[in-house]
Amino acid sequence: MRKLLTLCSTLCLMAILCVPASALEYTVEAPSGLEFASATSVEPVLTADRGERPNEDLSKTNPVVAPAFGSNTSYLPGSGEPLCSFLNVTGAIQRPVGNIPMIPLPNAPGIPSAPLVGNTSITVEPSTPTCGYTEVTGDMYYTGDYLGRIKIPSLGVNVKVYQGTDSSALAKGAGHFENTSIWEGNVCIAGHNRGAHGIFGDIHTLKSGDAITLTTKSGARTYSVFSVDKVKETDTSMLGRTVENQITLLTCVTGQSTYRWCVQAMETFDDRV
């Protein structure tokens, strides 16, 4: 009897396992009608042709970077920078070129104009200050063949400036270093420190803020002393061109032939002529 029950159970199990697989298949019908928009990666998504921004492209291939919160353009409709206009095909940031016109912000009196937002690129050019330099030309000489006059009120100096720093020029007054500026930038002047023409013998006693005035055919300019140093005879760094208008005075150091006194003064802003 037990063997018969076992045989029946085995036959039933085999019958269940032999059911055709097709009996387990099923299908689900798709909903009728279009319920989802087409992929934006393939076709652009455009707004309806109405309002102030008809047929606006809202595709994910045309993203817009919103302006900074609280900026001048943050509240303007359509403000922002198109992201793709600043990317090349490799995804690297491109350096913008060209210029953007400026437009005033509406209903915002007193606020500076903001750049026009759009695909127009901009130019970012770092500004480099240029050194001042005025070359000595024939029309810059006064009658008497001199270029100008140096005055140092605190030392009682009032002397003409001649071109060159050789013995003949310094025998007449102060000498202008050739190849340095005579007006804009760094004007460099030399003078004897002793003897009959020892006009610069006391310049090492000048103090910060003391005035030096240079007068040429280009005008008159007052400088304020900011540096008094003893430098090596071979040091010519102080003769270089500068962006700012300044004057440099040089003379020998008594008893120290390998050194020079160097006085530098910056143009006084309030006294520009």
Image (cartoon, helix red, strand yellow):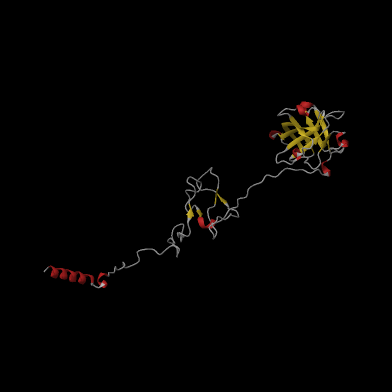
Image vertical order of residue 133 relative to residue 5, above or below: above
Quarter of the rendering occupied by the C terminus:
top right
- Please give the name of the residue rendered at 26% of the width and 71% of the height, measured from the top-left corner: 21
Percent from the top left, x then y, of residue 25? 27, 70
In the depicted structure, whether residue 203 falls above or below residue 164: above
The number of numbered badges drawn on the structure is: 0
- Residue 147 position by quadrant: top right
Residue 105: image location, x then y, percent: 52, 48
Percent coordinates x, y for residue 146 in the rendering: 84, 37
The residue depicted at 88 percent of the width and 36 percent of the height is: 168
Q: Is residue 250 above or below residue 133?
A: above
Q: Residue at x 23, y 70 (%)?
A: 17
Q: Quadrant of residue 134?
A: top right
Relative vertical location of residue 242 with respect to residue 228 in this rendering, above or below: below
Q: Quadrant of the N terminus?
A: bottom left
User: Where's residue 103, x and y in %?
Assistant: 55, 50
